[in-house]
């Protein structure tokens, strides 16, 4: 007997609208397989359903996923290569505000086992990702999610992504009010809305219940809403300080204040107006400039504000704008038991866990407990166990966090010891939540096609290194060290949010003696507090394998030389980036391949970090080309730009950043044996002709980063402020990294041609 399909068995349990959407997606899959649907159209279609492509050159084996036997009540079904359609990919699952019930977590665990590698990965946007999922399996996966109220719709693609919010909303002593119902209302109002279907790029929204803490991170979102209250005519009203046009990515930009008080009644219509303006005025052809931040930058915040207000007046009234306000107190969270105070001392391990992982709620007798998920990973077995613990201790109060952990809310304080014992039993009782050892990381080279260096491998290595650090030798400064945040991105796209970390890293590569070596740029000066209050800048690239030494030395110098109570960001501002760079300079050195081969591999991958058999020169010493000298000069110039920015000279900083790009472009042009001299017009002209127009410039970045130089040359900044100079420096750093990558590829091509010629001669 053939077992019923998931579509048949779940038909009555899925919301009709979601069921129909999934049926449509399955039909689109069929049309694509038959060649009747264009691949470009289908790619955006599956992205909007949360289905991504994935890389596989990561040295990891997942052969067990190639052939799987699924158990059904009526028998088994073996799925093997005959059912595969292309390589398995990744499915991103939207979890608005990170809220999950125990039943939903159970289903996610089942899906991870049956369709993926038994790992639920928590992202920095409070989503869940499942990797190594076959495209043919995605409709049934979506149906099983829909049956428990979860959708993957618009988790990816040019759409409104998952709306995030503070994981402590509603149970925080510092909040103006609980933003959960407002974030929930905006999520489902914009989901599938006709005004959000024609964007040129993605659109991100975040809610925060207060201004000073980082839980909501409103400052780097397209829309950032911070809860505020004010008195009008003797009546206290709730509303939002609304920010627009923020973003990290390759070139970060701080959000701008659109309105210091947007009432609850105006939140949804104003957000809709912003989306309509973005759809109408956002860039279409150049994806590198297709985010809302570029619309705000082009118009200026005053003109953008006027355009949005004008758009707001055009929108027909919608009863959904305010319908949710009648249900603000209808919280789905119901505690399992009454709040009870803890009346005895804790065992040392539990006391350490409580100090870092537990915070009191304003509701008497209750606390919030954070469960650390190293690298954001939760096994399917552990997920079921956490769901059971929620049922026992807290009820349906699970929330995922932007630091890739999860929290259990409404835990009676008296149950802290019992919960910790259970967490230790399932190996999730680790202390140190939101400390220096609780490192945020994007997937990097493990699964992301854009990954350059192993961010997850580095994060794991740093976690182990920091756990082994001799706390006793820190002379009472362990608590200050713990307050630091480390965040790692595998490339320039900032999925690991490295810009707002005390210590951030982004993956790059370097060519050393004809071989590629994984590196990370060190980013310092970011601020995690104040909703991601300020962005750091990269001060130099270091070999990936030496990053733990970089962290050790940087933190040791800070703890030794700082003024009383001085935070790392303030210390760097006081002593200057030049001092920090000098302190770490020797760690940038990469010995020859035969001298130390360990630096020629990356974390978590035993293979040599290289592409193809590059070969090495026959001379005893390395020959440094003029192009390499030029690229080194460009790095020096962009660092000098940082120093001028640090000193308050934004004009000089922007000028040097532009000059650094010209130096890097000149270095590439010289590879073609063209002597362009120092004339920027000639350099840019030759670069445009030889690298931009011919698409020889770093294919992974292409016109995106080349445009930074061309735009800076054609439209120089006139009396730039600090923010614009900061952005020009970021652009210069990205251009220089792309120039390095381009040079490496040129060297590889030349080496391959030489080998081919030698073989032909033989």
Image (cartoon, rainbow, N blue to C red):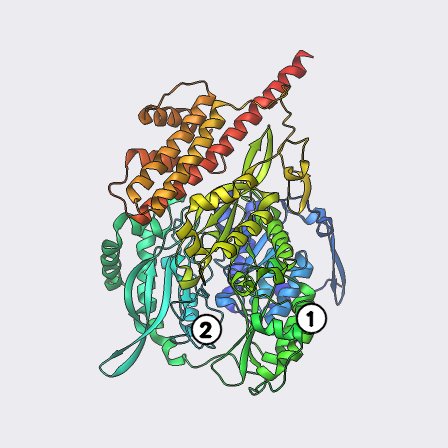
Q: Position of residue 708 (x, y in %)?
A: 37, 38
Of residue 307 and residue 682, the one placed in the foreground of this image is 682
**Measuring 35% from the left and 28% from the top, which residue is drawn there?**
684
Residue 665 picture location, percent across and down:
41, 29
**Real-space CA distance between mark 2 and mark 1, rounded to the nearest whole angstrom:** 27 Å
Residue at coordinates 45% horizontally, 26% vertically from top-left? 668
Residue 600 position by quadrant:
top right
- Does dot 2 land on a helix, a strand or a loop? loop
Mark 2 vs 1, N-terminal side: 2
Q: Disc 2 marks which residue? A: 169
Q: Residue at x 26, y 63 (%)?
A: 312
Q: Residue 439 appears at what percent x and percent y?
A: 56, 57
Please state if 25 lies on the left or on the right of 347 as rendered. Answer: left
Label 1 secondary element:
helix
For the C terminus, the image quarter is: top right
> In terms of depth relative to the viewer, which is nearer, 198 or 455?
455
Q: Nearer the viewer, mark 2 or mark 1?
A: 1
Name, please, the residue furthest toward the right.
75
| 410 up-or-down from 660: above or below | below
Pick the front one: 22 or 441 = 441
In the picture of the structure, the residue carrying the numbered disc 1 is 424
In the rendered structure, the answer to whether residue 595 lies left or right of residue 150 reads: right
Based on the displayed image, in which of its 4 quarters is residue 203 positioned? Answer: bottom left
- In the visual, does 546 lie left or right of 282? right
**Rendering coords of residue 760 (x, y %):** 66, 14
């Amino acid at each position: 007997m053939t077992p019923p399909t998931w579509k048949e068995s779940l038909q009555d349990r899925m919301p009709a609208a979601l069921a129909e959407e999934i049926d449509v997606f399955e039909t689109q899959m069929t049309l694509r397989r038959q060649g009747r649907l264009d691949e470009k159209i289908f790619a955006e279609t599956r992205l909007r359903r949360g289905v991504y492509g994935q890389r596989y050159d990561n040295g990891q084996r997942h052969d067990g996923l190639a052939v799987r036997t699924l158990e059904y009540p009526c028998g088994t079904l073996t799925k093997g290569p005959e059912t595969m359609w292309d390589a398995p990919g990744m499915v991103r699952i939207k979890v608005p505000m990170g809220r999950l019930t125990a039943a939903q977590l159970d289903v996610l665990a089942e899906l991870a086992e049956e369709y993926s590698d038994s790992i639920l990965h928590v992202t920095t946007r409070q989503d869940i990702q499942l990797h190594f999922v076959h495209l043919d399996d995605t409709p049934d996966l979506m149906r099983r999610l829909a049956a428990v109220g979860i959708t993957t719709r618009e988790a990816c693609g040019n759409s409104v992504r998952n709306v995030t919010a503070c994981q402590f909303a509603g149970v925080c002593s510092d909040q103006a009010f609980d933003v959960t119902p407002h974030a929930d209302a905006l999520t489902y109002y914009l989901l599938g809305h006709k005004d959000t279907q024609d964007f040129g790029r993605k659109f991100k929204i975040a809610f925060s219940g207060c201004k000073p803490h980082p839980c909501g991170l409103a400052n780097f979102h397209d829309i950032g809403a911070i809860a505020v209250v004010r008195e009008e005519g003797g009546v206290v009203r709730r509303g939002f300080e609304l920010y627009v046009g923020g973003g990290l990515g390759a070139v970060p930009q701080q959000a701008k204040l659109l309105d210091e008080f947007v009432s609850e009644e105006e939140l949804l219509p104003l957000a809709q107006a912003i989306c309509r303006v973005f759809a109408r005025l956002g860039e279409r052809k150049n994806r590198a400039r297709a985010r809302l931040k570029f619309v705000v930058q082009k118009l200026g915040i005053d003109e953008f504000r006027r355009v949005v207000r004008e758009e707001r007046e055009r929108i027909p009234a919608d009863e959904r704008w305010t319908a949710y306000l009648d249900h603000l107190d209808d919280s789905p969270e119901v505690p399992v038991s009454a709040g009870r105070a803890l009346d005895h001392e804790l065992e040392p391990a539990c006391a350490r866990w409580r100090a870092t992982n537990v915070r009191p709620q304003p509701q008497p007798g209750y606390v919030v407990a954070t469960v650390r998920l190293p690298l954001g990973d939760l096994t399917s077995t552990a997920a079921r166990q956490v769901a059971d613990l929620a049922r026992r201790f807290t009820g349906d109060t699970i929330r995922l966090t932007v630091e890739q952990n999860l929290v259990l809310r409404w835990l009676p304080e008296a149950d802290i010891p019992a919960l910790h014992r259970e967490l230790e039993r399932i190996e999730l009782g680790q202390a140190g939540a939101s400390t220096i050892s609780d490192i945020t990381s994007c997937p990097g080279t493990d699964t992301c096609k854009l990954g350059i260096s192993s961010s997850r491998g580095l994060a794991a290595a740093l976690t182990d290194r920091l756990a082994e650090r001799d706390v006793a030798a820190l002379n009472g400064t362990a608590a200050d060290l713990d307050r630091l945040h480390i965040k790692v991105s595998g490339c320039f796209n900032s999925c690991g949010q490295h810009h707002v970390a005390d210590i951030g890293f982004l993956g790059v590569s370097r060519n050393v003696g004809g071989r590629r070596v994984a590196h990370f740029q060190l980013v310092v000066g970011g601020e995690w507090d104040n909703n991601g209050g300020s962005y750091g800048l990269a001060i130099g690239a270091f070999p990936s394998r030496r990053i733990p030494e970089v962290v050790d030395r940087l933190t040791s110098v800070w703890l030794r030389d700082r003024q009383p109570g001085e935070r790392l960001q303030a210390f760097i501002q006081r002593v200057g980036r030049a001092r920090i760079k000098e302190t770490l300079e020797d760690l940038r050195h990469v010995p020859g391949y035969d001298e130390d081969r360990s630096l020629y591999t990356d974390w978590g991958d035993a293979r040599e970090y290289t592409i193809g058999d590059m070969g090495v020169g026959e001379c005893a010493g390395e020959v440094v080309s003029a192009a390499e000298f030029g690229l080194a000069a460009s790095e020096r110039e962009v660092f000098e730009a940082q120093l001028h920015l640090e000193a308050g000279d934004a004009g000089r900083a922007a000028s040097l950043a532009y000059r650094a790009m010209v130096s890097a472009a000149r270095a590439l042009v010289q590879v073609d044996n063209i002597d362009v001299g120092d004339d920027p017009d000639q350099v840019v002209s030759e670069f445009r002709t030889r690298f931009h127009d011919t698409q020889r410039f770093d294919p992974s970045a292409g016109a995106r980063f080349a445009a930074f130089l061309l735009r800076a040359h054609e439209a120089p900044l006139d009396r730039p402020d600090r923010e614009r100079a900061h952005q020009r420096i970021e652009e210069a750093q990205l251009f220089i990294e792309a120039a390095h990558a381009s040079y490496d590829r040129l060297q590889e091509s030349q080496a391959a041609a030489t080998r081919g010629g030698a073989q032909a001669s033989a």
